[in-house]
Amino acid sequence: MGSFLLPYTENEVFKKNPFATLDTVGVGQLIETAVTKGRKTRPDIKLGICGEHGGDPESVVFCHKVGLAYVSCSPYRVPVARLAAAQAALEEKLAAKKK
């Protein structure tokens, strides 16, 4: 984590490193808006994210919930990302069965 960010996380200005975990309240709203407006124009559009956020389990779950088609990350983070994506899909199926 960059030296400039440490005081912000120590004083809980940021709960997590925003360069590794998506801020679902701020940036997440922008992503949701992009997904909604993009699909309104092109229903078959493939949307996803890449980088550190693509390998963060919390971010992967959020991306699944808002309807992104894929995440991309470094090879070292692929197993964690795949596991998070599978768990998110299973949770969605279980929730649908309960309804």
Image: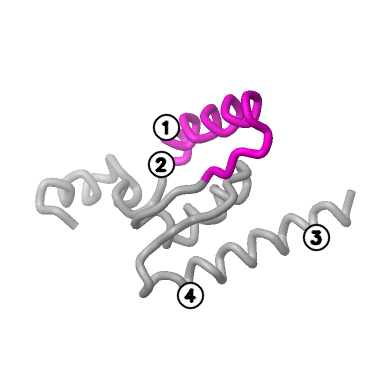
> In the rendering, which numbered label is found on residue 98?
none
- Label 3 is placed on what type of residue? Leu
Gap in angstroms between the C-alphas marked 3 and 2? 26 Å
Determine the secondary structure under disc 3: helix
Look at 50% across and 47% down and name the residue there: 48
Residue 35 position (above or below residue 63): above
- Along the horizontal axis of the image, is 53 left or right of 61? left
| Residue 25 on the magenta span | yes
Q: Which numbered disc, 3 or 2, marks the residue that appears first in the sequence?
A: 2
Look at 46% across and 35% down and name the residue there: 25
In this orientation, which residue lies closer to the viewer: 59 or 77? 77
- Most frequent secondary structure within the magenta stretch: helix
Look at 69% across and 60% down and name the residue there: 89
- Label 1 is placed on what type of residue? Gly
- Residue 60 image point, x, y percent: 51, 56
Q: Assess whether mark 2 and mark 4 are in contact (beta carbons under 8 angstroms).
A: no
Check disc 1: other Cα within 10 Å, few if <14, some if 14-19, many if 20+: few
| Residue 60 on the magenta span | no
* Residue behind mark 2: 23
* Residue behind mark 3: 94
Q: Which numbered disc, 4 or 2, marks the residue that appears first in the sequence?
A: 2
Q: Magenta segment, which residues?
A: 23-47
